[in-house]
Amino acid sequence: METSISVNDLPSKKFNNIWDEGICYSEVNNIITRKKSPEEAYKWIVNFQKNFSNNLEKHKDKINNNTRNKRCRDLYYIIYDILYQLKRLEGYNSIYSGIKENIKGFINSAFMNYSLRDSGYMNCLPASINEADYEYGNGKDKKYIDDLGEDITYIEKNIDQINSSHECSKIKAYLEEEFYTRNRIYQLNNEIYEKILGYYEKNNFDSFKDIIAKIECTTSEDSQQKVHLDDSETRLDFLPSHIIILPILFLLGFLLIFSFLCKLTPFRFGFNRKIWKKLIFSNNADDEVSHKILEHSSEYAQTNSYNDEYKVLYNSVADT
């Protein structure tokens, strides 16, 4: 049975850390972030020499699996980004050239030994690269775009397996996010990154998006998830009307029974007598209230007449 392709099978994920151990990445990254002294950088150079060849031997099968040129580009993207950041540290400017030449020498020695067995490693020698492609502080951005190109090529070659993968939706979402993120970088200065598109025989960045659009997930998990969501929406749509209708039906039934009792049973007469008594009581109460209001109004009118007389008298006195 064929193994389902996952996000971690994409080359950008699968080979992301292949050089870390050999170049002692954690050590040198700590030097950069903590701005350590040049003495620490010398220790890193020694450890680099010890580890690089061993790491190359450890990962030679992955490197030889039709990805050697890309793996070597990854190495130089990382190395030149490290060198660029070291050069900017205080106290490193005068020793930068020495650090750079030592690192290049160790890489050259390791690849030369392997090129005796496989001439393909000659393309990984420091002398075979154009330093201008790596050394201007944009190595990370170039690597990200190069990674996307490799992922897109992988997708294009394995589109059927991707579409039937259990992680098809995740793969598509990941690539769409990568495309929009890297496209913003590319559009800022596309001339710098055009060479990378050439590695994948593409003329423009949008061609990556066209390939991503070919991902059409056909897995049962995606279908089941859609059915589950539709079923949930149906249940949610039904629930409010169900809650409202039941009380209404109950109330209507109660009113019908009450009406039946009033018309066809002695209960009607008792009920009518009670209603009549309440009406009589209400009328009496209204008469009493009306009588009190009239009395109050009469008193209010008399008081107001006194007030009017007082005002007239006051005005007359004032006039004299």
Image (cartoon, rainbow, N blue to C red):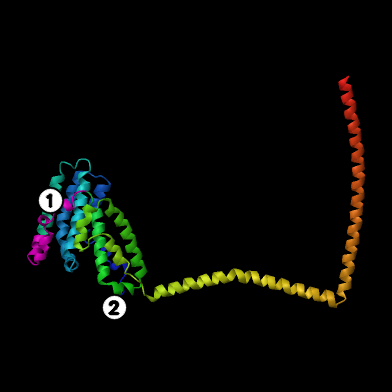
In the structure shown, which secondary structural element does the residue marked by tag 1 occupy?
helix
Q: CA distance from mark 1 to mark 2?
A: 46 Å
Q: Which residue is mark 1?
A: 102
Camera-nearest residue between 223 and 319: 319
Among the two numbered marks 1 and 2 on one chain, the one whose residue lies closer to the N terminus: 2
The mark found on residue 168 in the picture is none
Q: Position of residue 127 (x, y in %)?
A: 10, 55
Q: Main secondary structure of the magenta part?
A: helix
Q: Quadrant of the N terminus?
A: bottom left
For disc 2, the neighbor class at 10 Å (few under 14, some 14 to 19, many from 20) is few
SS for callout 2: loop
- Tell me if residue 53 comes above or below residue 249 in the rendering: above
- Magenta-drawn segment: 111-136
The type of residue carrying mark 2 is: Glu
Q: Is residue 223 left or right of residue 70?
A: right
User: Would you place residue 223 above or below residue 320 in this image?
Assistant: below
Location of the C terminus (image quadrant): top right
Q: Is residue 53 left or right of residue 292?
A: left
Residue shown at 37% from the left, 75% from the top:
219
- Say which mark, if any, is on residue 2: 2
The residue depicted at 54 percent of the width and 72 percent of the height is: 235
Query: Do we see residue 16 in this rendering?
Result: no
283 sits left or right of 76 in the view = right
Which mark lies nearer to you, 1 or 2?
2
Circle 1: residue type: Asn
Position in image of residue 83 (x %, y %): 19, 49
Q: Could you say where residue 276 lies in the image, as x and y percent from the top left?
A: 89, 65
Picture quarter containing residue 170? Answer: bottom left
The residue at the far top in this view is 320
Mark 1 touching mark 2, by CB under 8 A? Answer: no
Q: Is residue 6 above or below residue 85?
A: below
Visible residue check, residue 264 = yes
